[in-house]
Amino acid sequence: MTWFTDRFRVFTWPIEHPALTTTIAVVVVSVIAFALPRAKVDFSIEQLYPQDSKMAAEYKEHTRTYGADDTVFFAVRSGDPWAAEIATAEQEISNVAGVESTLSPFTMERLQNTKGVIETRPINASDDSPLIRGTVVALDESAGAIVVRVSETHNNHTGRDQLVTQVERILDRIPGEWHLAGMPIIRTAYVRLVLQDLMVLVPLSILTAGLFFILSFRDPRQVILGLVSITFGLLTSAAAYILAGGVLNTFSPAFFAVVIVVGTSDLIHLVHRFSDHINDHREPLDSEAVKQSARAAAREIGFSCLLTTATTAVGFLALAWTDLPTVQQFGLGAGTGVILTYLTTFLVVPPVLARIRPPSAAARRHAAEGGRFIQAVGRRVVAHRRAMIGLFAAVTVAMIVLGSQTTVAYRILADLTGSQAGESQLFMEEHMGAVLPMAVD
């Protein structure tokens, strides 16, 4: 293996060519700055079933013939369906940019035959037509609704979000218990949820990685280097994903977390091996000893991490053969992301390690003690190998039993459980009828 890795100089060229390394890093940063503002967040029901299925073909044919089926949402007020607040809210909502039309108990009309003449008239409390009950008047008369149709110009995330935000502000001013429901609301809620998860999960993952760096390195410069490296890898992966046409969806927070975890693992291996080689040199350490340690660590850990990264990437890339678009995008994003994070780690970290002061003696002792502890654990496991094999067998059986209990029960709105959008949709289904995509003509 030493003969092989010694000839794999690709792992050490960033140390030998700092100017080229810096140029590549600057180019990557430029690409990141270009790509990230172009990120698009998307939640669509079409992503939840195979795109080559009969269902997908029928849905596409339906939208080509009749247009989009996600242009209508409902503003529902609990209480008297004929309350004046509903009329006030409808008047204000109808003036919001992007609202094509509205209907409510006060503006909806129905056809009637009066002595052989077909004419329209306003609806009233005695009407029990299914176009009225469960649409603008609750089935049990416990609520009234405003049906809002979104224009095509605003039937996208930016337009929907602006429109829904304005409607929410209007309803906040008008007394009553209001609920917003329907596909435009669900799409907007999912996009907001994804962005909220990203704002929490990504910083939390980086913070967790930082804690591992502190516990592992005990050297502030190496901790900062580690945080910069995994953040650089994460942003590079995100930029590549966006430029390849990927959209941010419900799987995106998990994709970014995977990239951070894999990058953290590779980086800890690299820095610890660097410390091992530093310990092989006598004090005082000169710059050449530090460079030699960085080269040796990059060659040895570079090839080992290449193998582990490749197997991890292949596992995720295999998801590209699934039928669900969201899972395909997650697999492609995570697979390419771990590879790009590996490349950025070995582009940035070895040359920096070779040019900064070596870790303190205390930090090197901590790293050596950690290595000795793991060796002691390994010897103990080998000494009690029969017990360990028995424990492994017992755990395997338990996992098989538990795994066999897995059930498949996907609910479209499961992710919104407990949120305002989820509660509003539940209220809608209980009082106004079970409606998700619905257009009223």
Image (cartoon, rainbow, N blue to C red):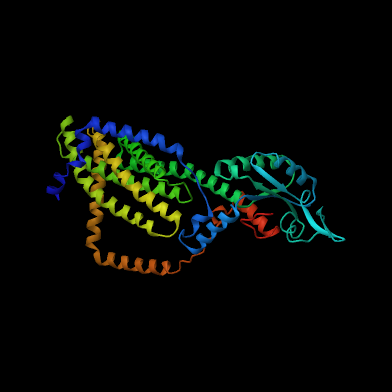
Q: Residue at x 56, y 41 (%)?
A: 158
Q: Nearer the viewer, residue 101 or 432?
A: 101
Measured as percent of width and height from the top left, residue 169 is found at 67, 39
* Numbered-mark total: 0
Q: Residue at x 43, y 50 (%)?
A: 254
Q: Residue at x 42, y 52 (%)?
A: 329
Asked whether the viewer can see residue 11, the reply is yes
Q: Is residue 2 left or right of residue 248?
A: left
Asked whether the viewer can see residue 297, the reply is no
Q: Residue at x 25, y 67 (%)?
A: 386
Q: Is residue 320 left or right of residue 56?
A: left
Measured as percent of width and height from the top left, residue 125 is found at 82, 56
Q: Nearer the viewer, residue 161 or 368?
A: 161
Q: Is residue 39 above or below residue 385?
A: above
Residue farthest to the right, as pictured: 115
Measured as percent of width and height from the top left, residue 315 is found at 33, 56
Residue farthest to the front, as pictured: 116
Q: Is residue 49 above or below residue 297?
A: below
Q: Is residue 218 above or below residue 102?
A: above
Position of the C terminus, as image quadrant, is: bottom right
Q: Nearer the viewer, residue 113 or 125?
A: 113
Measured as percent of width and height from the top left, residue 324 is found at 45, 58
